[in-house]
Image (cartoon, rainbow, N blue to C red):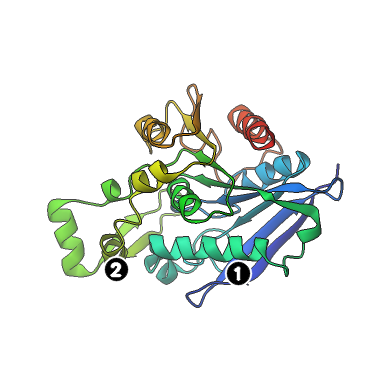
Amino acid sequence: MVVKQEKNISLQGMHGRPIPTDVFYTSEGANKPVLLFCHGYKGFKDWGAWNLMAEAFAKQNFLFVKFNFAFNGGTLEDPIDFPDLDAFGENTYTKELDDLKVLIDWISSEEFPYGELVDLSRFTLMGHSRGGGIVVIKAAEDERIQKLITLAAVSDFGDRFPKGEELEAWKQKGIAYIENARTKQQMPHLFDFYQDFVQNEERLTISRSAKKLKIPALIVHGTQDPTVGIDNAENLKEWIENSELFLLKGSDHVFEVSHPWEKDELTPAMEQIVERASGFIKQ
């Protein structure tokens, strides 16, 4: 089964930057469910094994779409890693929600180039880590979304901000830096990021959105996740009425994948995720 892929399609974001977008699909079969994937913090659409994951879902007869958030630090010409740290510093949660709306609108529009292949009544959002929190909020806001999958998702954005003196220092300087352990880049965050959260705190409180959800949700988490604790998954399970929890025993935050990923196969944990998620969407 040959998987076709269209890479780095340029969609115009709402804030002056393009959204590089990939589509994976096969020619066989029609009425394909749509699976739209959001990367996480310091992530990008081509990280690790995300391309292999996209191919695996395409082989399950999904139309799989993934993209870079417009302000993730990548560019259309260089979507891998973070050539544009100024853009990274300007990112906010509400910008990411706007980007996701652009993607959903595009896929749902008559201009969508793959419209004859898909069944829009089977539209699933999936997000990893911070992207998992974003998709919970967006799924509660947008009735076009029929199912939800989170991978190692955070359950509280506010809890992840610095507190006390560290927060005050950030406010005084207007900018703070976090080192990327892999690239060694000093990645900036403008204080606007925190102010945007405070100004939109009701909307950005994940528990509020989760409790409103009526659609089915699959919550996937590794039991040895050192980055986003398993309690985040348990919170989502408690809040989302129609949800199931899929725990991967011994697995970490990225399901044993790293970047760059030189292998031509997924990790056992990722294979389990593709299998379980495919069954969840098709049921």
**CA separation, marks 2 and 1?**
24 Å
> Residue 67 is drawn in which quadrant?
bottom right
130 lies left or right of 190: right
105 lies left or right of 169: right
Assign the N terminus to one quadrant of the image: top right
**Residue at x 46%, y 47% (from the top left corner):** 136
Residue at mark 2 = 192
Provide the secondary structure element on which disc 1 rests. Answer: loop
**Residue at x 54%, y 33% (from the top left corner):** 256
Residue 60 appears in the picture as rendered: yes
Question: What is the number of the mark on residue 76?
Answer: 1
Say which label, 2 or 1, has the lower sequence index: 1
Towards the viewer: 253 or 209: 209
Q: Residues within 10 Å of mark 2 (few under 14, many from 20)?
A: some
**Residue at x 49%, y 41% (from the top left corner):** 214
Badge nearest the viewer, 2 or 1: 2
> Please, what is the three-letter code of the amino acid marked with disc 1?
Leu
Towards the viewer: 259 or 73: 73
Q: In the image, residue 205 lies at what x, y percent?
A: 33, 50
> Please, what is the three-letter code of the amino acid marked with disc 2?
Asp
Q: What is the tally of numbered marks visible in this picture? A: 2
